Image (cartoon, rainbow, N blue to C red):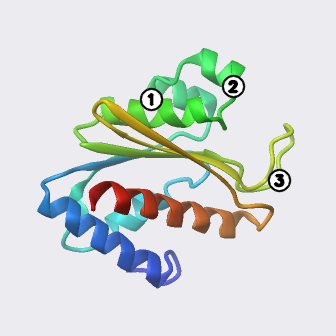
Amino acid sequence: MSEERHDKRSEQRARRMLTTLCEGGLKLASAESCTGGLIAALVTDIEGCSHAFERGFVVYSDDAKHDLLGVPRAILEEQGAVSEDAARAMAEGALQRSGADLAISVTGYAGPTEDGGTEGDVHFALARTGETQHRFERFGPRGRDAIRQCCVDTVLEMLESAVS
């Protein structure tokens, strides 16, 4: 596993969470925007239990969110791609378009924006059949790498709570 790609604590947490998924016979899918695939990379780097990861969607653009996950254009146009409704629709779309038992989504601003968004504002959602949970975090202007690591930590926390 690459020490440069993930911090050690995240790797350990991901291993524990994936082991729990494996023991429960559960599969995970991810829908990532501002993290650009970091969650998928983290969980697939874990030897021995990465098979609990069913698939990942990296959907940076609005078109990708709509085309690959079925996020309604109305949500993207009216609430924006960085919103509770978009995060929920992303997680629900990943769940519906995969063989996973739960799906996590992340959409936010990892860096400065030109469209009036606030750097560090991130929406997360965790979907299971019949249930979707939302979480909003305001990480502040810490820089892209730090915000993305905060996103990974938040996703791990949400997943740990969901499978414990």
Picture mark count: 3
CA neighbours of label 3 inside 10 A, class few (<14), some (14 to 19), many (20+): some
Closer to the observer: label 2 or label 3? 2
Comparing 121 with 64, the one in front is: 121
Sequence order check, earlier mark of 2 and 1: 1
- The residue where tag 2 is placed is 79
Q: Height in image: 137 above or below 41?
A: above
Query: In the drawing, does residue 121 fall left or right of residue 73?
Result: right
Sequence order check, earlier mark of 2 and 3: 2
- The residue where tag 3 is placed is 112
Q: Quadrant of the C terminus?
A: bottom left
Mark 1 element type: helix
Query: At 35% from the left edge and 64% from the top edge, which residue is drawn?
Result: 43
Query: In the drawing, does residue 85 fall left or right of residue 80?
Result: left
Mark 2 element type: loop
Query: At 24% from the left edge and 74% from the top edge, which residue is drawn?
Result: 47
Closer to the observer: label 2 or label 1? 2
Looking at the rendered structure, which numbered label has been put on residue 68? 1
x and y, in percent, of residue 48 in the image? 18, 72
Query: In the drawing, does residue 147 fall left or right of residue 115?
Result: left
Q: Height in image: 109 above or below 87?
A: below
Query: Can residue 97 be seen in the rendering of this structure?
Result: no
